[in-house]
Image (tube, rainbow, N blue to C red):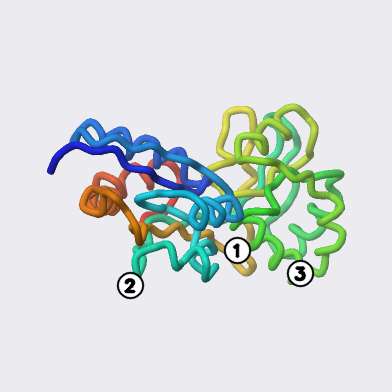
């Protein structure tokens, strides 16, 4: 297969393992990946308004009928999944989140939290807050961030008390991860992959998906704090 350049859209939450896997694939095949990362709303806009060859996106993107129409028909492949966790500034006291009730109290006692409401994680959190009966309060407490990196910055700099986001994202030396949300209310964000309906390089895109779900790709995903598949 001739070396080619592919346009890829991907969720920001999978960026850390994805960059490494993409670099390995490029080194092995000679293909070049031009990757644009975004939140769910941004990815829907990319899928419906721009040209691309391949998507590795949260499942929520595929639930949007307009976006789904821009991917090839047929089943999509699950690539990775990860739960939601909470972190504080490194060295800070770690509040209790061991049960749903303890988590509720910790969230209510926090002055502010950093997260991305307009994301697949934000959608899952919205459901969790509703279940805990604190949705309206958490809307007021949430300091919305534009991208995952800013969540870490906000808590590390003291601008927010808690980082509430994907576990693999909030693992950073400047933060202390308290842990995942309690199992009884935990929700995962699942990333899926599919070739664009009008891909100019469908064979190369399919080759990358094969590499992404291979043992080598799965090993990187696991090493970066996510579960393959």
Residue tagged by mark 3? 130
* Residue 11 in sight: yes
Residue 124 image point, x, y percent = 63, 63
In the rendered picture of this protein, how many numbered marks are placed on residues?
3
Question: In 3D space, how far apart are the residues under numbered discs 2 and 3 (Cα atoms)?
Answer: 33 Å
Residue tagged by mark 1? 186
Eye-nearest disc, 2 or 3:
2
* Residue at (68% x, 48% y) in the render: 116
Residue 221 versus residue 122 in the image, above or below: above
Label 3 CA crowd tier, 10 Å (few <14, some 14–19, many 20+)? few
On the image, which quarter does residue 102 sit in? bottom right
Residue 31 image point, x, y percent = 24, 36
Residue 34 image point, x, y percent = 38, 37
Q: Element type at marker 2?
A: loop
* Residue 229 in sight: no
On the image, which quarter does residue 199 sit in? bottom left
The answer to which of marks 2 and 3 sits earlier in the sequence is: 2
Residue tagged by mark 2? 74
């Amino acid at each position: 297969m001739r070396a080619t350049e592919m346009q890829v859209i991907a969720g920001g939450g999978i960026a850390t393992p994805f960059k490494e896997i993409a670099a390995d694939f490029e080194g092995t095949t000679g293909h070049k990946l031009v990757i644009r990362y975004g939140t769910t709303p941004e990815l829907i806009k990319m899928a419906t308004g721009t040209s691309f060859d391949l998507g590795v996106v949260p499942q929520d993107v595929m639930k949007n009928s307009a976006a789904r129409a821009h991917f090839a028909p047929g089943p999509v492949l699950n690539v990775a999944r990860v739960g939601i966790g909470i972190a504080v500034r490194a060295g800070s006291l770690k509040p209790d989140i061991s049960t749903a009730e303890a988590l509720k109290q910790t969230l209510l006692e926090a002055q502010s939290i950093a997260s991305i409401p307009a994301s697949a994680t934000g959608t899952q959190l919205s459901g969790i807050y509703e279940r805990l009966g604190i949705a309206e309060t958490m809307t007021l407490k949430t300091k919305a961030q534009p991208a995952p990196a800013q969540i870490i910055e906000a808590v590390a700099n003291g601008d927010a008390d808690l980082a509430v986001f994907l576990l693999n994202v909030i693992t950073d030396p400047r933060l202390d991860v308290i842990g995942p949300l309690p199992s009884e209310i935990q929700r995962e964000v699942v990333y899926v992959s599919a070739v664009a309906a009008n891909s100019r390089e469908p064979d190369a895109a399919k080759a990358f998906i094969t590499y992404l779900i291979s043992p080598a790709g799965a090993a990187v995903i696991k090493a970066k704090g996510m579960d393959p598949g």
